[in-house]
Image: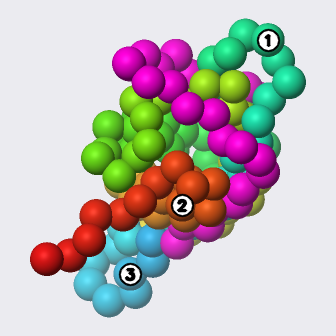
Amino acid sequence: MQFYLYMTGKEGVAVPGRCRGEGRFVRQMGPPGRYGVIDLVLEPTKESFGHCVLSWEVSESQIPLVFLDGVISAIKHVMTEDGFAGDYLYGTVIRVVDGDYNQTDSKLSCYAKATVLALHAALTEAGLYEPAQAA
């Protein structure tokens, strides 16, 4: 399943090559609702449309589709961070290639956090994200 992500801004950037990011938001202590695992691959696309595409390549047992909104929200959030090299991604496919789900502990917010972690890792590998330095 593919979704076109229309993002705008002053400066669009594309990934220079294939990069991968893994996001693991797992908290075993405390109340239920703290489990989200997602693996992303960012690749340049050969399509001429220029936009960013989210390719959902996982089964319902890996990551239920109900968590898609958290993944999309997290992608938009990362694009607004100061550490990101531009305002949006273009000519890029964000592929959700793997993940894990727990019926009791998985929540939308856990997949949003896991997606942020995975996207930070992939964009850092691509040279398009520089985390803020702690003072």
User: In terms of depth relative to the viewer, which is nearer, 33 or 27?
Assistant: 27
- Percent position (x, y) of residue 45? 80, 29
**Which residue is tagged 3?**
27
Say which amino acid is labelled 3: Arg
Mark 3, Cα crowd under 10 Å, few <14 / some 14-19 / many 20+, is: some
Give above or below for 69 relative to 27: above
Q: Quadrant of residue 92?
A: top right
Say which amino acid is labelled 2: Thr
Q: CA distance from mark 1 to mark 3?
A: 42 Å
Residue 93 visible, this orientation:
yes
- Percent position (x, y) of residue 109? 35, 54
Q: Which residues are magenta?
A: 1-24
User: In terms of depth relative to the viewer, which is nearer, 77 or 90?
Assistant: 90
Going by the image, does 99 lie left or right of 29? right
Q: Which quadrant is the N terminus positioned in?
A: top right
Say which amino acid is labelled 1: Ser
* Residue at 71% over, 43% down: 16
Residue 95 visible, this orientation:
no
Q: CA distance from mark 3 to mark 2?
A: 24 Å
* Residue at 27% over, 78% down: 31
Foreground mark, 3 or 2? Answer: 2
- Percent position (x, y) of residue 48? 79, 11
The image's mark for residue 124 is 2
Q: Is residue 108 magenta?
A: no
**Which residue is tagged 1?**
48
**Residue at the limit of the structure toward the left, as seen here:** 135
Q: Which type of secondary structure does the marked residue at label 3 adopt? A: loop
Q: Which type of secondary structure does the marked residue at label 2 adopt? A: helix
**Residue at the limit of the structure toward the bottom, as seen here:** 29
Comes first in the chain, label 1 or label 3: 3
